[in-house]
Amino acid sequence: MSVRVDKFMWCVRLAKTRSVATELIKKGKVKINQDTIKPSREVKVGDVISLTKHNAEFSFKILSLLEKRVGARLVEEYILDITPAGEIEKLKIYQESQKVYRNFGTGKPTKKDRRDLEEFLDWE
């Protein structure tokens, strides 16, 4: 059995849709055995998929191939997470640093926000 990498990523829930998986591959955020690939590349048992998310690189070893998407509980039968602990820490640090910024969707500062900022900075 042979499976395209974009379809495999979708089947084991590394991407929400096949088109998202294809975009990640085209942007160079997915590698197999440290090689840059195309979405049509076929995967085989034993390959290592590396997925770059923000500033961390996650690695998964393929244990078995499949044709259809599986439930989240069954994913462990098909891939093994071999991501180093340091990479997971990188992602956590990135996520914490993003919390410092203004909440998404709140828009530009209000007049009150501007006045409070001016008062804090003692501008006139």
Image: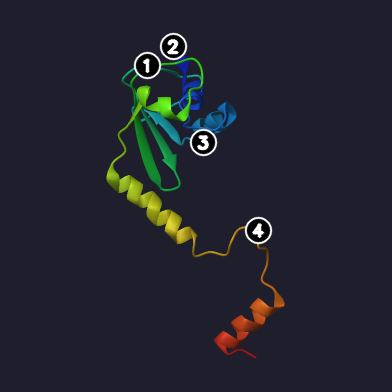
Q: Earlier in the sequence, mark 1 or mark 2?
A: 2
Query: In the rendered structure, are the residues bearing label 1 and label 2 in contact, judged by CB atoms less than 8 Å apart?
Result: yes
Q: In terms of secondary structure, where does tag 2 sit?
A: loop
**Callout 4 environment at 10 Å: few (<14), some (14 to 19), or many (20+)?**
few
How far apart, in angstroms, are the residues tagged by discs 4 and 2? 43 Å
Residue type at mark 3? Lys
Q: Which residue is mark 1?
A: 44
Q: Is residue 60 above or below residue 5?
A: below
Residue 10, image x and y in percent?
A: 51, 26
Verify CB contact (< 8 Å) between mark 3 and mark 2. Answer: no
Foreground of the two, 81 or 35: 81
Residue at (58% x, 61% y) in the render:
103
Q: In the depicted view, which residue is nearer to us: 43 or 9? A: 9
Task: Give me the C-alpha separation between circle 3 and circle 1.
Answer: 22 Å
Report the amino acid beneath label 2: Ser
**Sooner in the amino-acid sequence: mark 4 or mark 2:** 2
Residue located beneath label 3 in the image: 27
**Mark linked to residue 112:** none
Q: Which mark is residue 105?
A: 4
29 horizontally vs 33: left or right: right
Q: Residue furthest right?
A: 111
* Image position of 61 (left or right of 7): left
> Which percent across, then down, holds residue 94?
42, 55
| Image depth: mark 4 or mark 2 in front | 4
Lower sequence index among marks 3 and 2: 2
Which residue occupies 66% across, 71% down? 109
User: Circle 2 sits on which residue?
Assistant: 2
